[in-house]
Structures are given as structure tokens and as C-alpha cells.
Image: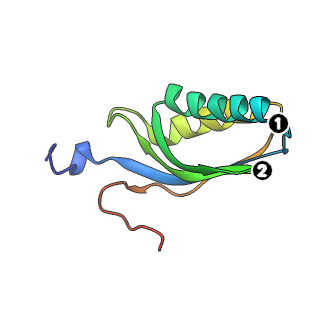
Amino acid sequence: RKKKHRREFKEIGFDFKVCFTPIYDDEKHFEMIDNIYWLIEQHGFAAGGGCDEESCDGHMAVLSWRINADEQKEKLQVALLNIPEVTSVKFGRNIDAWYGPFCE
């Protein structure tokens, strides 16, 4: 079951979008994006996706099957909203990160 990511070893994933006010200083902009992804990792998630001038979006997965995804999502949302430039944080519904269903 562990190698096939089934039952208690299922990996939870979800889509995310973090919106922020544009920062026109490249160094500060990339520093804020690094901070966003650092917070994501500190709360037990791995994220992939992309960023532009006003948002970061993509998909996150829980790093350990022992983590309560919903509880950590709430904590992460609070932490991200504490960044002064961040205006909104949206998370999608939890899905099986290996088997979907995925958005097309």
C-alpha cells in the first residue's frame, strides 16, 4: 500500500493561488516569493507552479501522510496573509495527488 500510495499512505494535494500587490523592485519581489515558498515548506507542503507580477499559483502536496492537510492549510493561510503584500490566499479542494481527479 505504501509504494502504491493507497489508504493511509495516500498523498493529499490541492491547487492554490496567492495574490499580492505588485512590487516593482525585482529584488524585493523575488524575496517575497522566496518567503511564500519557504512558508509553504515550513508547513509541511511541497509546491510547484509559477509566479508573475501579481500572483503565484500551482499545486501543493502534503510531504508526510502523518500531516493533517486541512489543519495545516488553515495555519498556512494565516501565515501567508501575515505577509504585508499578500492580498488573498485560495486553496482548492483536497484530491489524491497520485491518482486525481485532476483539472484539465
Name which residue type carries label 2: Glu
- The structure residue drawn at horizontal position 46% and vertical position 54%, both measured from the top left corner, is 94
Along the polypeptide, which appears first: circle 2 or circle 1? 2
- Count of labels shown? 2
- The structure residue drawn at horizontal position 32% and vertical position 37%, both measured from the top left corner, is 65
Mark number for residue 45? none
Give the percent coordinates (x, y) of residue 50: 59, 51
Mark pair 2, 1: CA separation: 10 Å
Q: Are marks 2 and 1 in contact (CB under 8 Å)?
A: no
27 displayed left or right of 7: right
Q: Which residue is mark 2?
A: 54
Q: Nearer the viewer, residue 83 or 96?
A: 83
- The structure residue drawn at horizontal position 59% and vertical position 29%, both measured from the top left corner, is 39
What SS does tag 2 mark?
loop
- The structure residue drawn at horizontal position 82% and vertical position 36%, both measured from the top left corner, is 85
Residue 75 appears in the figure: yes
Q: Residues within 10 Å of mark 1 (few under 14, many from 20)?
A: some
Q: Which residue is mark 1?
A: 85
Name which residue type carries label 1: Glu
Give the percent coordinates (x, y) of residue 43: 52, 29
65 displayed left or right of 69: left
Q: Residues within 10 Å of mark 2 (few under 14, many from 20)?
A: some
Q: Nearer the viewer, mark 2 or mark 1?
A: 2
2 displayed left or right of 16: left
Give the percent coordinates (x, y) of residue 41: 50, 30
Residue 83 appears in the figure: no
